[in-house]
Image (cartoon, coloured by chain):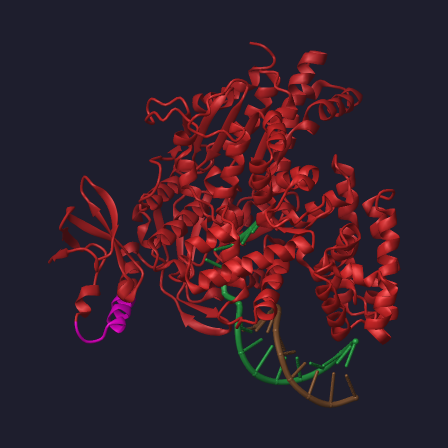
Chain colours: A red, B green, C brown
DNA sequence: TTGGGTAAAACCTCG
DNA sequence: TTTTACCCAA
């Protein structure tokens, strides 16, 4: 066995199949905990070490920045182990410190540095820093490589300004948030304003299309892109410019995509363009020296709210593959062996997910022992729930000396649920970290300082400019700003900056405030001149002083101000670290990195703290002990999904994700009463609780858990159904789980779920031999057998 | 122009 | 309960 292949011996046959795949398409259907990250990293290492692929030709898309970082680290280790054998003839651990340093630096320079690994957003931002100036918008808008990236709040205020000011519409009727959401959705499905209008030709659709057009114009005027544009613009650029596409197509011969079930239409278009060089997909056949390798699990698709579409994964073989059935195909491999969780946990997870209708058939096979039973706790309210869970944590930590605080995770549906747990954890002095919530880069002081940097890099960015022109106070108030903006508008939408830099105009328009405006523009100009010569960190350091920002915080002198000061200091550390760790150290690269950072990226694994996070954030992570909390109707599944069977299935997948995070112990809990906005509301147990297999669960509610838990739910349903339609025909809606029915087309079956409430009820019915189908009793003839 | 006050809205998930 | 938006006095 040669040195370059013996690391493959650690893999099981399916993993090995995936890892050794060289050219052509491959879909890896990878269940939770089946070693998919390992398959990805090993394959990249194998491409380079065995097939001698130039690292420059590899593009790997991950779901988070953190995953990208970890993948790079793991590949680095694999490279190092192989090179140690090859160059020194001994294992990595036997190398002297000097040789090790030398080897690592050589590996970084020749191999790791050239790999493109990152999220869709980060990779696309990088491509755009090369090529955005070649992009031609149909309306003639232009962007430069110093474009700003607008976050969600920037985007929403832009939409709000268009709705209320430019179009003079009621922002109650056209809620900026929902309009922005509609635009985002359109972009994620690769729809232009015209496309959108064609799809929704009604009044609302036309208005939104109009806002969308103006919104895009606004972005262009600011030389800015939103998150969705980061993907959409490269797609359009590739579609319109053969040379640009040709370059990247030639460069990225081997493309790998993780979490493929969570890609949206636009991201799919991007991948397809890069793979086929724009050729029609059914004609593309040139797989020599080229591969596309995607890894995903339809059962873990939980991002449909940002237009992710798991049918893209289901269609992979039709798109790229040989179109053969599962058993014969050479373009799909399934990883079904789970190395993470105990058999009990897997049993519960498998049982739950079987309630979904739309999935690729797949079971997680246990490789570990049975493990402890799952415990389900019914609490009186959210405080009692937190008390119970923290008591369990203290207890387990006490009884099992091998457990650290960081081995525990509390997973919930919404960020707002963290508070109760934080209070109790604080009371017992248990260290914890809340992941999600307010991101570091979303704090006010950080956004302020970044806005300064953004204006310095991109003065056309009027949104950032307005944010800081009067921070700290320079006597430039609302009315002054309004006059200046009007002037910019009248001159045909020139950037505000152009008005500000003309001293005469400023003196005419701003009057008393002119002094402050001029001071501000002078400040920005000073740093713009240094943009090419100075490092970002140097600019930031001087700026904090010269702008008076730090001074103002010190003068304020409150505890809060000192906390902000600390955060600003931390930002300075962040930029220093960025410059140290990254190949591309420009201020532009740092700003993009800051815009795209997620709170998940800052998860501290060394800190030994209990982790609190949403189920969405927990994807891809694992913990020995997991608490899955708040399993109540309306909370989880969330109330917005109650009436929509497809949405309920997504909530169920989310629950599946939560369960499969657990390695050793799983606790599930719900409360009978919960505080919402401050007032107490009664809560009923989640639909999902009744779907868990009784014999693997212990509970504090006595034996016979599913019966007892479904009863109150049935009563609520009955009440809701009766209330929804008083008088005649209430019996139509009075369905219960377990009802035997006869359907005019499918024959007899059993009701297994009830979706929604009132007159919007849908039933999931299991028909022997035909499987489970979701049926609207109002639209089909259903007869109940008594 | 600024700062303080009160009233109304917000809590779904995210790069 | 907490956060944000808007109004008015100084």
Residue A668, x across and y down, in percent: 42, 53
Of the pair B13 and C4, the residue shown nearer to us = C4
Residue A389 is inside the magenta segment:
no
Of the pair A509 and A513, the residue shown nearer to us = A509
**Taking the image as drawn, is residue A663 in sight?**
no
Residue A713, x across and y down, in percent: 30, 63
- For the point 77% across and 42% down, the residue is A577
**Taking the image as drawn, is residue A670 in sight?**
yes
Residue A733, x across and y down, in percent: 21, 64
Q: Residue placed farthest to the left in the image?
A: A786
Residue A720 is inside the magenta segment:
yes
* Image position of A678 with respect to A580: above or below: below
Q: Which residues are magenta?
A: A715-728
* Image position of A372 with respect to A94: above or below: below
Of the pair A255 and A697, the residue shown nearer to us = A255
| Side of A753 where A448 appears, left or right | right
* Image position of A99 with respect to A263: above or below: above
Q: Quadrant of residue A705?
A: bottom left
How many numbered marks, from 0 up? 0
Q: Quadrant of residue A69?
A: top right
Query: What secondary structure do most residues of the magenta stretch adopt?
Result: helix
| Side of A658 where A542 appears, left or right | right
Classify the position of the N terminus of chain A by image quarter.
top right
Of the pair A626 and A558, the residue shown nearer to us = A558
- For the point 47% across and 50% down, the residue is A195
Classify the position of the C terminus of chain A by image quarter.
bottom left
Residue A188, x across and y down, in percent: 51, 48
| Side of A314 where A525 appears, left or right | right
């Amino acid at each position: 066995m040669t040195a370059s292949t013996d690391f493959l011996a650690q893999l099981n046959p399916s993993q090995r199949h995936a890892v050794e795949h060289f050219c052509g398409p491959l879909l890896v259907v990878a269940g939770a905990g089946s070693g998919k990250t390992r398959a990805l990293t090993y394959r990249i290492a194998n491409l380079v070490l065995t097939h001698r692929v130039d690292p420059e030709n590899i593009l790997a898309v991950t779901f988070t920045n953190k995953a990208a970082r970890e993948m790079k680290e793991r590949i680095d280790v694999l490279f190092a182990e192989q090179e140690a054998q090859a160059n020194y003839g001994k294992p990595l651990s036997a190398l002297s410190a000097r040789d090790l340093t030398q080897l690592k630096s050589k590996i970084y320079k020749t191999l790791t540095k050239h790999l493109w690994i990152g999220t869709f957003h980060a990779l696309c931002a990088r491509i755009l820093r090369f090529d955005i100036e070649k992009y031609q918008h149909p309306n003639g808008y232009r962007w430069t490589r110093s474009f700003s990236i607008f976050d969600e709040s920037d985007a929403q205020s832009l939409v709000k300004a268009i709705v209320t000011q430019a179009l003079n519409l009621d922002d109650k009727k056209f809620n900026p948030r929902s309009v922005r959401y509609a635009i985002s959705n359109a972009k994620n499905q690769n729809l232009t304003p015209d496309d959108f209008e064609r799809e929704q030709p009604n009044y609302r659709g036309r208005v939104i299309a109009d806002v969308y057009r103006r919104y895009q114009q606004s972005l262009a005027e600011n030389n800015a892109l939103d998150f969705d544009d980061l993907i959409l613009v490269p797609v359009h650029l590739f579609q319109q410019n053969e040379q640009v596409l040709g370059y990247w197509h030639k460069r990225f011969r081997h493309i790998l995509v993780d979490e493929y079930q969570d890609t949206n239409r636009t991201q799919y278009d991007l991948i397809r363009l890069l793979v086929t060089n724009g050729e029609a997909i059914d004609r593309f056949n040139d797989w020599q020296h080229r591969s596309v390798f995607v890894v995903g699990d339809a059962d873990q698709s939980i991002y449909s709210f940002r237009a992710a579409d798991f049918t893209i994964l289901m269609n992979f073989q039709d798109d790229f593959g040989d179109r053969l059935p599962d058993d014969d195909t050479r373009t799909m491999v399934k990883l079904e062996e789970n190395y993470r969780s105990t058999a009990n946990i897997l049993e519960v997870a498998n049982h739950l997910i079987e309630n979904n209708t739309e999935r690729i058939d797949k079971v997680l096979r246990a490789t570990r022992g049975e493990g402890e039973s799952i415990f389900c706790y019914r609490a009186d309210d959210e405080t009692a729930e937190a008390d119970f869970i923290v008591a369990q944590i203290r207890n387990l930590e006490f009884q099992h000396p091998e457990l650290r605080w960081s081995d525990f995770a509390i997973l919930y549906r919404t960020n707002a649920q963290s508070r109760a747990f934080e209070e109790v954890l604080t009371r017992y002095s248990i260290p914890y970290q809340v992941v999600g919530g307010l991101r570091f880069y979303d704090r006010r002081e950080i956004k302020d300082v970044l806005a300064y940097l953004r204006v310095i890099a991109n003065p056309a960015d009027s949104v950032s400019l307005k944010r800081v022109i009067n921070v700290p106070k320079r006597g430039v108030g609302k009315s002054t700003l309004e006059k200046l903006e009007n002037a910019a508008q009248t001159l045909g939408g020139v950037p505000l900056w152009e008005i500000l830099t003309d001293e005469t105009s400023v003196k005419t328009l701003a009057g008393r405030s002119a002094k402050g405006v001029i001071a501000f523009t002078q400040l920005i100009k000073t740093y713009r001149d240094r943009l090419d010569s100075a490092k970002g960190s140097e600019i930031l350091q001087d700026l904090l002083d010269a702008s008076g920002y730090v001074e103002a915080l010190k003068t304020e002198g409150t505890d809060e101000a000192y906390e902000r000061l600390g955060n600003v200091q931390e930002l300075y550390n962040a930029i220093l670290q960025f410059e140290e760790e990254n190949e591309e150290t420009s201020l532009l690269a740092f700003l993009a990195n800051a815009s795209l950072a997620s709170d998940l990226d800052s998860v501290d694994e060394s800190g030994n703290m209990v982790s609190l996070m949403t189920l969405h954030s927990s994807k891809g992570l694992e913990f020995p002990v997991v608490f899955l909390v708040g399993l109540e109707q309306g909370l989880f599944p969330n109330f917005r999904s109650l009436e929509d069977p497809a949405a309920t299935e997504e909530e169920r997948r989310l629950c599946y994700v939560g369960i499969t995070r657990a390695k050793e112990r799983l606790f599930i809990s719900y409360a009978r009463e919960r505080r919402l906005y401050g007032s107490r509301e009664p809560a009923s147990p989640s639909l999902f609780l009744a779907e868990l297999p009784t014999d693997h669960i212990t509970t504090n509610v006595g034996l016979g858990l599913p019966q007892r838990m479904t009863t109150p739910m049935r009563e609520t349903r009955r009440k809701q159904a009766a209330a929804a339609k008083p008088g005649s025909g209430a019996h139509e809606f009075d369905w219960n789980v377990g009802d035997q029915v006869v359907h005019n087309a499918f024959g007899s079956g059993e009701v297994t779920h009830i979706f929604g409430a009132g007159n919007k009820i849908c039933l999931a019915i299991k028909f022997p031999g035909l499987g489970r189908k979701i049926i609207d009793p109002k639209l089909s003839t259903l007869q109940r057998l008594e």
